Amino acid sequence: MTDGVFGRFSGHEQVVHCQDEHTGLRAIIAVHSTALGPALGGTRFHPYPTDTAALEDVLALARGMTYKNALAGLDLGGGKAVIIGDPATVRSEALLRAYGRFVASLGGRYITACDVGTHVADMDTVARETRFVTGRSEDEGGAGNSSVLTAYGVFEGMRASAAHEWGSPDLRGRRVGVAGVGKVGRILVGHLVEAGAEVVVTDVAEAAVDAVRATHPSVEVVADNTALLAADLDVYSPCALGGVLDDDTVQTLRARIVCGAANNQLAHAGVEKLLDERGVLFAPDYLVNSGGVIQVSEELRGFDFDRARRRVASLYDTAGRVFALASDEGVPPVTAADRLAERRIAEVSRLRSLRVP
């Protein structure tokens, strides 16, 4: 079974299985590429049903980070980690510090950060065992909550999508459906409301919906993601877990644009073509959700929020380049984004092979 997983996700430089029986730690660290620099990517804490499911997720996520970091203009490669288990029940200082020891053992080839199920406080704990950690608290010299600029990047990507689709980046009066109003989706809703959009939300966690409604009472709520997909929307924004767009959901979708924070939104290869055939503009997830990795990468040279925010704002222009290339070459935006990322990886990798006096 494992051989089949590696067959589907080939090309990774290193995969490390981490286990500490005393703390209950079971984790996998995947380094996809260090062609541009150390592999930076978050740690996901999730109760995977099987070890194979965890491996599939971490391999796909690590590859996505290679492309995300390349397209964001960072001198960083791609990696990811998953901790297997329910963070609500197994998270502990000892487990996180044991995980930090495994990160340290890679000697800087992998730099970790927050992801689904992990938080800034967790990164502070991991950092007690290794210096290869970003996404730390401001008290510890870090950038704090990376969700802030992740949401801002998605918002800028949405504005660029609107400009390409409708000739103007203005979202006023546009009906936007946000699936998942957790760490990132909640902040994104704030940007959308401020921009004058009509916002519809859903989330499996009732408390998350209640928190959004308490701050933004004008927001409409629907029962679930199925209802949101079928709703009369201009923009659909998936901001929870990935794999939400498959053959069936693409046929249900009524929005003209898909632009959200979730990683790996396409359930399988070929879905991007189905979206393109239906006239749906898909903003590549690893492009528009790269604000968080840009934010935490800034910690590596001394964090400055305004400088990080300016870099995230440039995602608007990068998205425009991707859409323009897609139109020129007659390919889906995902293909165009991949080509731009691969071009940069090849060019910079070649330069690093030069021997100069």
Image (spheres, grey):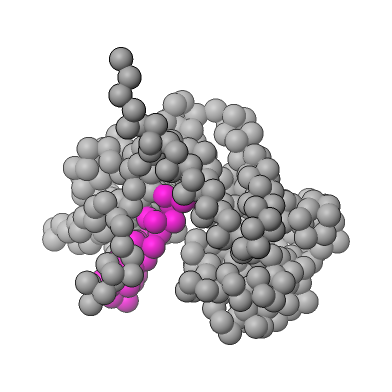
Q: Give the range drawn in magenta.
A: 44-68
Give the image location of residue 234, x and y in percent.
Answer: 77, 68
What residue do we see at 72% from left, 56% from top? 161
Give the image location of residue 131, x and y in percent.
Answer: 30, 34
Q: In this view, does 140 lie to the left or right of 245?
A: left
What residue do we see at 64% from left, 34% from top? 310
What residue do we see at 22% from left, 61% from top? 26
| Residue closest to the eye, 119 or 92 | 119
Query: Any magenta on residue 75?
Result: no
The N terminus lies in which quarter of the figure?
Answer: bottom left
Quarter of the image for residue 141 reads top left
Determine the residue located farthest toward the left in the rendered image: 21
Residue 275 visible to the viewer: yes
Give the image location of residue 205, x and y in percent.
Answer: 55, 70
Query: Any magenta on residue 56?
Result: yes
Give the image location of residue 22, x and y in percent.
Answer: 14, 58
